[in-house]
C-alpha cells in the first residue's frame, strides 16, 4: 500500500476528475467512507462476469453457426473454444471500468481509515491479480485509468 501512501491516493482522486465530476467523486467518497466498498466490489465483479458471459455467448454462436452449416462436431468444438477465448473490442473498456471501480474502492477504504483486510475491492484484486500486481495497478491508476487493462494479465488468466 506504499503506492497509495506516497501520493498515489491523491493522484487517483485527481484522475477520477477526468471521468466523473468532483460532485460525483465527493458524493461517492462520503457515501462509502464509513461503509467500505462492498457495492463497488460487487459491481466490478459483475462487470467482469458479464465479460466472461459475453465471451461464452460469442463462442456458442460460432459453434452453433458451424453446426448449422453441417460442420463436424470437432470443428464446432474448436470454433466455440477459439471464439470464446478471442479478445473482443470491448474487453479493455470493461476491464478498465471494473478495475477503476476497484481502485476507487481501495482509495475510499484506505482514506477512510479502514483496515486493508476488510476492503472488498482490495481482496478481489488480490484474489484475481495477486499481490505483485497491486502496486502496478495502483500506479497505473494514478497515471490514468485507461492504462489499467495493460497492467493486468492477459485475458483468460483468471479474471
Image (cartoon, grey):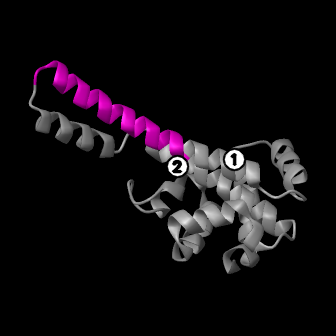
Residue 140 coordinates in the image, percent (x, y):
57, 64
| Residue 16 vs residue 105, the one in the foreground | 105
Number of labels in the image equals: 2
As drawn, 101 above or below 9: above
Query: Which residue was labeled with disc 1?
Result: 18
- Residue found at the very far front of the displayed protein: 73
Q: Is residue 17 visible?
A: no
Residue 95 is marked as 2
Secondary structure, magenta segment, majority class = helix
Magenta part of the chain: 48-70
Q: Quadrant of residue 7?
A: bottom right
Residue drawn at the location 56% of the way across and 66% of the way down: 127
Badge 2 density bin: few <14, some 14–19, many ≥20, Cα 10 Å: many
As drawn, 3 above or below 148: below
Q: Secondary structure at mark 2?
A: helix
Q: Is residue 95 visible?
A: yes
Q: Quadrant of residue 70?
A: top left
Residue 135 coordinates in the image, percent (x, y):
59, 74
Relative to 68, 104 lies left or right: right
Measured Cα–Cα span from mark 2 to mark 1: 18 Å
Residue drawn at the location 17% of the way across and 24% of the way down: 67
Residue drawn at the location 18% of the way across and 41% of the way down: 78
Asked if labels 1 and 2 touch by Cβ distance under 8 angstroms, the answer is: no
| Residue 50 vs residue 30, the one in the foreground | 50
Relative to 78, 152 lies left or right: right
Looking at the rendering, in which quadrant would you find the N terminus? bottom right
Amino acid at each position: 500500500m506504499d503506492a497509495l501512501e506516497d501520493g498515489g491516493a491523491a493522484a487517483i482522486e485527481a484522475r477520477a476528475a477526468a471521468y466523473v465530476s468532483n460532485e460525483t467523486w465527493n458524493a461517492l467518497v462520503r457515501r462509502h467512507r464509513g461503509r467500505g466498498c462492498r457495492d463497488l466490489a460487487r459491481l466490478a465483479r459483475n462487470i467482469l462476469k458479464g465479460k466472461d458471459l459475453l465471451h461464452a455467448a460469442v463462442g456458442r454462436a460460432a459453434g452453433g453457426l458451424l453446426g448449422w452449416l453441417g460442420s463436424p462436431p470437432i470443428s464446432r468444438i474448436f470454433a466455440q473454444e477459439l471464439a470464446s477465448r478471442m479478445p473482443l473490442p470491448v474487453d479493455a473498456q470493461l476491464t478498465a471500468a471494473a478495475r477503476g471501480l476497484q481502485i476507487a474502492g481501495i482509495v475510499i477504504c484506505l482514506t477512510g481509515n479502514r483496515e486493508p483486510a476488510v476492503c472488498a475491492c482490495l481482496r478481489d484484486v488480490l484474489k484475481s491479480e495477486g499481490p505483485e500486481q497491486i502496486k502496478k495497478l495502483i500506479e497505473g491508476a494514478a497515471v490514468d485509468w485507461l492504462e489499467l487493462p495493460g497492467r493486468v494479465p492477459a485475458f483468460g488468466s483468471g479474471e
